[in-house]
């Protein structure tokens, strides 16, 4: 295992998780690994498998290039840029809400939509 790469992935994952306002346990659950394994991953003690890396990118809303330290900027925590300019980073609470919404089934989404509509009245 390349220890330097494992540490780079772990650091980028931790920074993305903190920006998203998620706990290690929440990310572990969404990525479908144990909290202990995720904690070791953030500390650079374990290298994620390719399927886990893919799920991690999806859950943390981070590109694989950023997670692997391959982005041109050299900073793993910068938001991805679009061809039209700088893309703004959503607020952590919004990212956390989106992460939770993505786990919901259709019935839960309908209930949430109704509650959100009621809050806006």
Image (cartoon, rainbow, N blue to C red):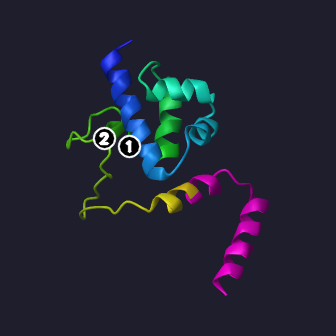
Q: Earlier in the sequence, mark 2 or mark 1?
A: 1
Query: Label 1 belongs to which residue?
Result: 63
Q: Is residue 109 visible?
A: yes
Q: Kindly identify the residue that appears in the image at 67 percent across and 50 percent down.
A: 103
Query: Label 2 belongs to which residue?
Result: 76
| Residue 76 on image: x %, y % | 30, 41
Residue 57 within the segment the image draws in magenta:
no
Mark 1 is surrounded, within 10 Å at the Cα level, by few (under 14), some (14 to 19) or many (20 or more) other residues, namely some
| Residue 92 on image: x %, y % | 47, 58
Q: Kindly identify the residue that appears in the image at 43 percent across and 25 percent down.
A: 43
Stretch in magenta: 97-121
Is disc 2 placed on a helix, strand or loop? loop
Q: Kindly identify the residue that appears in the image at 33 percent across and 28 percent down.
A: 8
Residue lying at the far bottom of the rendered structure: 121
Mark 2 is surrounded, within 10 Å at the Cα level, by few (under 14), some (14 to 19) or many (20 or more) other residues, namely many
Q: Quadrant of the C terminus?
A: bottom right
Residue lying at the far left of the rendered structure: 73
| Residue 24 on image: x %, y % | 55, 38
Q: Kindly identify the residue that appears in the image at 20 percent across and 41 percent down.
A: 72
| Residue 52 on image: x %, y % | 53, 30
Is disc 1 placed on a helix, strand or loop? loop
Examine the image and state in which quarter residue 30 appears: top right
Residue 115 within the segment the image draws in magenta:
yes
How many discs mark residues in the rendered view? 2
Above or below, 15 against 10 in this view is: below
Q: Main secondary structure of the magenta part?
A: helix
Front position in the image: 36 or 6: 36
């Amino acid at each position: 295992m390349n220890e330097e790469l494992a540490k780079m992935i772990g650091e980028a994952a931790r920074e993305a998780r903190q920006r998203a306002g998620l706990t290690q346990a929440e990310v572990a659950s969404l990525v479908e690994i144990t909290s202990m394994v995720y904690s070791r991953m953030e500390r650079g003690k374990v290298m994620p498998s390719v399927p886990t890396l893919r799920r991690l990118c999806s859950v943390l809303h981070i590109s694989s290039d950023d997670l692997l330290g391959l982005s041109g900027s050299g900073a793993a925590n910068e938001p991805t840029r679009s061809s039209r300019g700088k893309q703004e980073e959503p607020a952590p609470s919004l990212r956390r809400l989106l992460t939770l919404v993505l786990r919901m089934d259709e019935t839960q989404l309908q209930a949430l939509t109704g509650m959100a509509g009621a809050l806006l009245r």
